[in-house]
Amino acid sequence: MSDQQRPGVTVFLTGLSGAGKSTIADALVAQLEAEGRPVTVLDGDVVRTHLSSELDFSKEHRDLNIRRIGWVAGEVVKHGGTVVVAAIAPYEAAREEARRLVEKNGRFLLVHLSTPLEVCEDRDVKGLYAKARAGEIPGFTGVSDPYEPPARAELVIDTSVTPLTEAVARIRAEMA
């Protein structure tokens, strides 16, 4: 099937900071691009810098940020594109709204990286969890703000027990 005939798809990676979203996104994108498949990447940190820089980390603004990501992803899949999203996206309602925005135009594959909080904290190279626990970062997901696990994830992957190559292979299988 040519790229023009293939329905668009968004792979939406969600999980705590340090769960492996960017690592998996990078590996997945590298594979897809090596096969000649163009991919649009919507990384939560990059989107916040360029599309949502005026937003803070209140629940309302986090939800608005995810709606924006969902809208952009929906526009890309409308034209048969592939989108890989890597965003904490802590709230169920906002993720489901992103799903609706994408599914108007293509497929939506929600991948919950269910990596335990302790593992995410151990991986934290930026020291964000320590700062959050010290009260320096208010409203930090997993510490002082909730992460609502997805009720309708197509895949659930714990990166503390699933090797990167297997995680990517499982996502690719679900994309097929």
Image (tube, grey):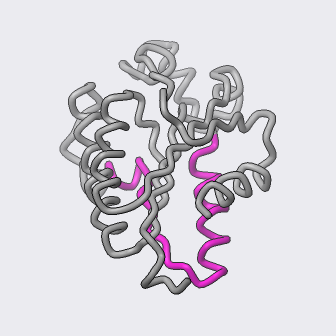
- Camera-nearest residue between 152 and 11: 152
User: Residue 114, position in %: x, y?
Assistant: 63, 30
- Camera-nearest residue between 89 and 127: 89
Helix, strand or loop: magenta stretch: helix
Q: Residue at x 32, y 51 (%)?
A: 69
> Residue 49 colored magenta?
no
> Residue 32 colored magenta?
yes
- Camera-nearest residue between 12 and 51: 12
Q: Quadrant of the N terminus?
A: bottom right
Q: Residue at x 43, y 57 (%)?
A: 107
User: Residue 143, position in %: x, y?
Assistant: 49, 16
Residues drawn in magenta? 20-48
Vertical placement of 114 versus 167: above or below? Answer: above
Q: Quadrant of the C terminus?
A: bottom right
Q: Is residue 6 left or right of residue 102?
A: right
Q: Is residue 37 left or right of residue 72?
A: right
- Camera-nearest residue between 8 and 84: 8
- Residue 99: which quarter of the image? top left
Q: Residue at x 70, y 34 (%)?
A: 158
